[in-house]
Image (spheres, rainbow, N blue to C red):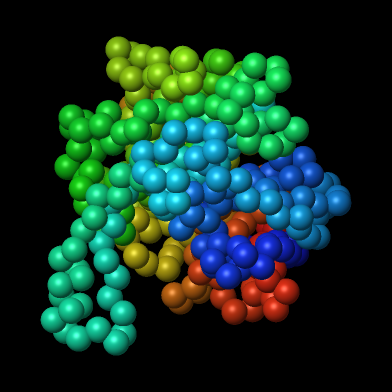
């Protein structure tokens, strides 16, 4: 894979102080704007460029708290762990990981403390977010002058919905980094009010098969309700991504581009696959046996440079942002460098 160029993402001093710029987990291009999220906040970020056709830098960073426009399952300042962003019509869609968390071991911990931390798992209900955010002049709003309304999928998100699922229920309380439930990608296709929402799971990966959830949410009095697909409120699709889970997704015509990487806490491999015709898929096609095209391999470091978000530029190239960026990506100004790669 050849990196065509880099793009500078410049954040405010406050965002740099809170490490938002080194915890990037989701990205979506939107004309002159770039919507982005970090995985340790309850906000979405908007940056702006001068040349959407071939941006060199996104700046003018503005942060928007999600709690200002939708009800969250946790407190307003609790980590939502936003892992996916998609723009469709007048709406910005966001999804939290829904994952449980196991505590980290740090180098200064004693053996006893390290073992104790590894036994500590928290449910993290604040992460159970799926929301459709109405935009008014590119600013999140509870309701726009045109009547578009922000809405969320209830306080339990998908978690309660999956409690009886034959495949996924056993993984709900397993931490995401342990191949437990971990929603990391969202793609939305179709006219507003008739859209389909695809959620890509980093985990679980089931004997090498990755999982996509297909939903048809509809707004009802400020909440999202799920229309039934084949008699159920969601459909499951299994994809053979060579044992990898889904890190992000984006729409490309009627296709979906899938950023894939390990479900566990590993550096790589990291790849982009094309799922042809995914937007027109029959919801009854549970195990997808059609051809998935391996578009390209992305670089990764050792303990850093984890590709977490992809977005299409108007040029047809792919913008890639990284969690835990390598030192060469960080500038003293508070900017972080993203990659642009040709498809």
Q: Is residue 321 positioned above or below 274 on the image?
A: below
**Viewer-proximal residue, 233 or 157?**
157
Quarter of the image for residue 135 reads top right
Can residue 314 be seen from the camera position used here? no
Q: Residue at x 23, y 43 (%)?
A: 172
Q: Residue at x 71, y 20 (%)?
A: 145
Q: Is residue 157 left or right of residue 313?
A: left
Q: Position of residue 104 (x, y in %)?
A: 29, 70
- Image coordinates of residue 149 in percent, x first then y, are 58, 22
Q: Position of residue 170 (x, y in %)?
A: 17, 42
- Residue 170 seen: yes
Provide residue 115's location: percent of width, then percent of height. Answer: 15, 75
Depth check, front residue: 193 or 139: 139
Residue drawn at x 28%, y 57% is: 101
Q: Is residue 95 left or right of residue 128?
A: right
Indicate the quadrant containing the N terminus: top left, top right, bottom left or bottom right.
Answer: bottom right
* The quarter of the displayed image where residue 5 is located: bottom right
């Amino acid at each position: 894979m050849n990196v065509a160029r880099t793009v500078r993402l410049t954040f405010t001093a406050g965002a740099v102080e809170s490490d938002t710029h080194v915890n990037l987990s989701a990205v979506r291009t939107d004309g002159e704007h770039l919507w982005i999220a970090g995985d340790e906040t309850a906000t979405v970020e908007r940056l702006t460029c001068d040349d959407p056709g071939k941006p060199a830098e996104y700046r003018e960073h503005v942060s928007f708290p999600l709690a200002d426009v939708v009800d969250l399952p946790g407190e307003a300042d609790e980590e939502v762990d936003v892992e996916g962003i998609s723009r469709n019509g007048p709406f910005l869609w966001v999804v939290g990981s829904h994952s449980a968390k196991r505590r980290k071991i740090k180098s200064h911990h004693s053996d006893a403390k390290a073992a104790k931390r590894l036994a500590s798992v928290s449910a993290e209900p604040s992460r159970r977010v799926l929301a459709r955010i109405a935009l008014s002049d590119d600013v999140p709003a509870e309701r726009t002058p045109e009547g578009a309304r922000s809405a969320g999928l209830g306080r339990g998100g998908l978690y309660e919905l999956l409690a009886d699922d034959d495949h996924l229920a056993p993984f709900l309380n397993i931490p995401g980094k342990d191949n437990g439930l971990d929603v990391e990608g969202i793609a939305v296709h179709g006219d507003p009010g008739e859209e389909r929402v695809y959620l890509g799971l980093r985990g679980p990966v089931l004997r090498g098969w990755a999982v996509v959830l297909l939903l048809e949410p509809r707004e009802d009095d400020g909440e999202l309700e799920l229309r039934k697909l084949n008699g159920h409120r969601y459909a499951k699709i299994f994809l053979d991504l060579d044992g990898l889970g889904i890190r992000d997704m984006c729409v490309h015509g009627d296709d979906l581009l899938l950023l894939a990487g390990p479900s566990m806490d590993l550096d790589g491999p990291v790849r982009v696959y094309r799922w042809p015709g995914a937007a027109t898929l029959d919801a009854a096609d549970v195990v997808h046996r059609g051809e998935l095209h391996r578009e390209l391999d992305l670089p990764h470091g050792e303990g850093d440079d984890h590709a977490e978000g992809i977005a299409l530029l108007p040029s047809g190239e792919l913008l890639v942002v990284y969690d835990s960026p390598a030192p060469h990506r960080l500038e003293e100004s508070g900017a972080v460098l993203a990659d642009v790669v040709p498809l």
